[in-house]
Amino acid sequence: MQFSNDSLLLSLKESLINVRAKKSDIFYGWKISVSDSHSLQSLMLGDPYQGLASYQDREVHDREYAIEIFTRSGGPMMMGNSTYNIDPLAPLEAQIYKTLENALQVSNRPWDLPQPEKILPRPVVTSDPQIKTDIKAAHATLLEQVRAKAKKIDVVKLNSAELYTNIHNTYFETSTGQSGEQDRTDVYFELALEKLPLPNTQEVLKMKTAISIDEADLPAFIDEIVEETLSIDQANLPKTQSHAVILVDGKTISDFLKNLLTQISASHEYNKLPFLLPGHKTYNGEKTADSDKLSVTLDPTLPVMAASSAFTSEGLAAKKGMVIENDTVMHQVVSNRIGQYLGKESNPMMGNIVVPLGDYSKEELLKSTPECLEILSFSSLLINPTTLTWSSEIKLGKLYKKGVFKSVIKGGVVSGDIKENLRNFKFSNKEKKINEVGNNFIPAKGYVGPDAMLIKNGVKIAGE
Amino acid sequence: MANTIQRNRAEFPSHLTDIRAIMPKLVEILESGREKNWYCFAWLEEVKTQMSVCAITEMSQESLDRGMVLRAFIDGVNFERSTNRLDQTSLMKWAHEFRSELDKKFDSNHKYKQEAYKTAPWSQEIARGLSPDFLEQLPKDLNSKSVVHFGVMCEENPALTTVAGLKKRTGELRTKLLDLSHSYVQAKNQEAVQDDPYQDLVEIRVMMRQELKTHIFVDRQKNMSQTLPISLAAATGIIKNGKSTRGISGGLGGLEITRFRDEQINEVTQNAVRLTKAAHLPPGRYQIITGPDVTGVIAHEAFGHTQEGDTWMKGRSIAENLHKQRQKVGNDKASIVNHPNMFTMDRHSFGTNGSYFFDHEGELARLQVILDKGMLSPPMTDLTASTLLRVPRTANGKRESWRRPLMTRQTNTYFTPGDSTLEELIGMVKKGYLARWSHGGMEDPKGGSLTAGAAYFEEIIDGRMTGKLFLGPSGGHVELSDPVFSMLDKIVAKSNTVNDQRVPEVKFGGCGKYHKEGVDAGCGGPYILWEDINCG
């Protein structure tokens, strides 16, 4: 997608420059963001003849223009900023003046906007060429993979599926001369199925998000879910326990770490929320001697990963770095703005969460404890990023005694505290790669690390 | 609910008049000559959002999101195209391209399995019954070409809201809350000398937002619009260790409905402070009273999601078989209502953000009982689910935005009220807890279990509130979780309402379907005393 010749973008930029010249006493700076998205969406029902049959077929074209205006005014000088989604059918200058007025309503401490860097950020591969070249062909390929696989499945009942193939192109430009453009692609697939014979009351619903068709590997993903569905048996409630041992999957590890990592952001320090500084430990209390240690690198350069990016949200070059090493915080992530507020140097580390593998297989981890509950799925895992406590109903789990499967578990509530959990844990030695595409509310998450984590501390279960 | 202040209905935004005029032409392009087997409509949504946040870091935001969906419903399948390129030339070209695609897919020799869906004309809608909120807004001599607009009653005209106005209110509210909280801490510390005195909150973050939603729906029988102002004030009190409490006020109406009452003020200024000394709840089963907020989440997750027609249609709900088998799934006090056209509730003269006049497929909103004294009714539906399941259509077809697919979604879901007072319910508890404020929830329509979160518990011993607060076993929120049937069989008593239509308190809320597709949805009900619930 080429934005440089977009007529609305050019008019918008010209209007911003004009208004800024007229209001130079208060109009400090601006940023324009443009995004262009194309989405193909197929919603399917289980069908006895076709395996899965479409009941919704959608195509969406979306182009958005947004501006952010920065003001400096008053004595003592305060800085304001406000964002505005541009209505292409309404006069541009009036919308700019309105945004300017909105920005003047905001009174924050002044900060200097970032300037263009001497060395341009290195491009990062954030899209699948196959989807980028021809999204319709790519979606048809994925749909065919799913249908062909579904047609052959007779050991479980397929209830429904959803498939979305998306391209998002984004461009930004600022009054200080920064600019950048990125293409992103993604595939979202979900499948709901249940074991035969019917009726039963246990359904498996799994989602997969990927950046490329190859990474999605939908036929293999479907095989994996079918296998899991077949392994489900009559379920029991878990026992009530104050010191439970559980095994969680790569997705849960990534969710725990994503929340933990919010506390190394300097914005938490400025906004008086709990925060971690270099030298702080990632656990509470005394570490168990034979526990694994946590190390985390943020890497924005990994190709075709959800959290890869050449730029930070402030338009600076995104930087790779080891933020936690052997349970100790090594760096605080500091934005340009917050760095100026706190008198700290900017440290634009961001990216995919990369965690070294452990020493044991998942099976060995399960064997290593007298009793362990493997959580296959949470109903809704809620993690509080400020307290780092978490809880959920258990949607599906498996109880093991010394590594031997005993029963399927469903129901009850499991809860914990990440800093307590990190006192005594072990990672598996098998790698899992996870990509979760971000949206307006949730940042993207990429994870490369262990596919399982045995947690031996700080977990409680309310059950029988 | 008597209200002497002048209120007016939100008007149709004049800047949408030109786009509205094109919409019948787009529908005609799509279905012309194919009316026997194709049913088409055009849907436009515009959401104007203004927001102001007062906190250590302030912010403001204004946005206008507008997009259109063209739908062709053919042989039980929805074909949709969506765009936000809305100039007349682009729209006409887009509609012709879509028509051409459909013509290729369904050539003149195509053997249709079914005839086109027949949408009801206004005369049938009126004969079927519409509430006064609709009837008083319908023009005379209604026909398929009549332009109809529905607006919500407001004291403060939402079209006049500005970010500057929001900033003024957020700033004043934050200052007031910080002062009140500081006074509370001082008073508590003066009451008794404490080894571990109460500390001031580290932050109170106040957000005020108004969304002005306008929808236009055009098909072969109707050309109607609705303007829905959704106003919200939210304040979060935060203590040093990151624990927080939140008060919110808002719903469907002008900014007048965002005024904080004592319960929200106390939640932010006092209870956040009190949480510093909260104990941790041992996991187990307890006698519980849920407040409207938590009661609503239980209604929403129990037989709300389970009664969504598309979930039935996919074979993913336990409710379909239970309905067919006439199996009782709760005791006689277990009644849940789906109420999209809810414009008053309990003591308030406004509805919630889950209310509207018609859904996103143009179905007019009417009240529906989805669980009647423990017996399941037919489900809530969208057009596809209603067609495939051969059950009545209801106004529950909703989408997150024009960018996303439409599904069967909840509007306002609530337990019907009872005849006790809250004090009487508390008096019936030997040892248990009051769960007043919700903290998320999740459905399991196939498995028939549910989980509803409570921010914290308030202890009740021997029929009296002890003043002690309890967090979850690990120091976070508390999860209430049980199989739905056993839970709904354990309703002991419910509180009353002062509302003359017997609508209890319904809370401002949002809902995801499984893990995505966020939509506005109110949920609520009376205070309910439950025999016991598993808590962890």
Image (cartoon, coloured by chain):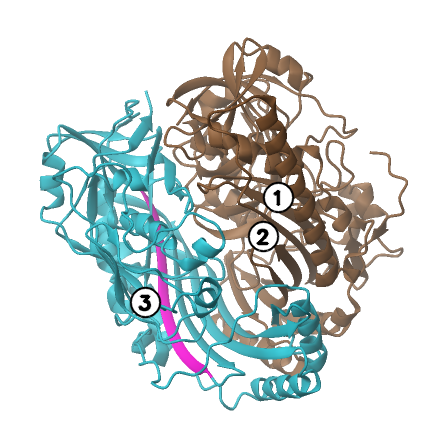
For the N terminus of chain A, which image quadrant?
Answer: bottom left
Q: Tell me which residue sits at (68%, 17%) in the image.
A: B421
> Could you tell me residue B351's position as x and y percent?
72, 42
In three-dimensional space, the C-alpha distance between marks 3 and 1, rounded to whole angstroms, equals 34 Å
Q: Tell me which residue sits at (50%, 31%) in the image.
A: B275
User: Which residue bears the numbered disc 1?
Assistant: B411
Q: Are marks 3 and 1 in contact (CB under 8 Å)?
A: no
In three-dimensional space, the C-alpha distance between marks 2 and 1, rounded to whole angstroms, equals 9 Å
A110 in the magenta segment: no
Q: Are marks 2 and 1 in contact (CB under 8 Å)?
A: yes
Secondary structure category for the residue under label 3: loop
| Colour chosen for chain A | cyan
Have a look at marks 2 and 1 and say if they share a chain: yes
Residue A359 shows in this picture: yes
On residue B398, the disc is 2
| Colour chosen for chain B | brown
| Range shown magenta | A178-194
Q: Is residue A184 left or right of residue B345?
A: left
Secondary structure category for the residue under label 2: strand
User: Which residue bears the numbered disc 3?
Assistant: A211
Q: On screen, B71 above or below B532?
A: below
Q: Is residue B368 left or right of residue A61?
A: right
Image quarter of residue B493: top right
Q: Is residue B224 left or right of residue B414?
A: right
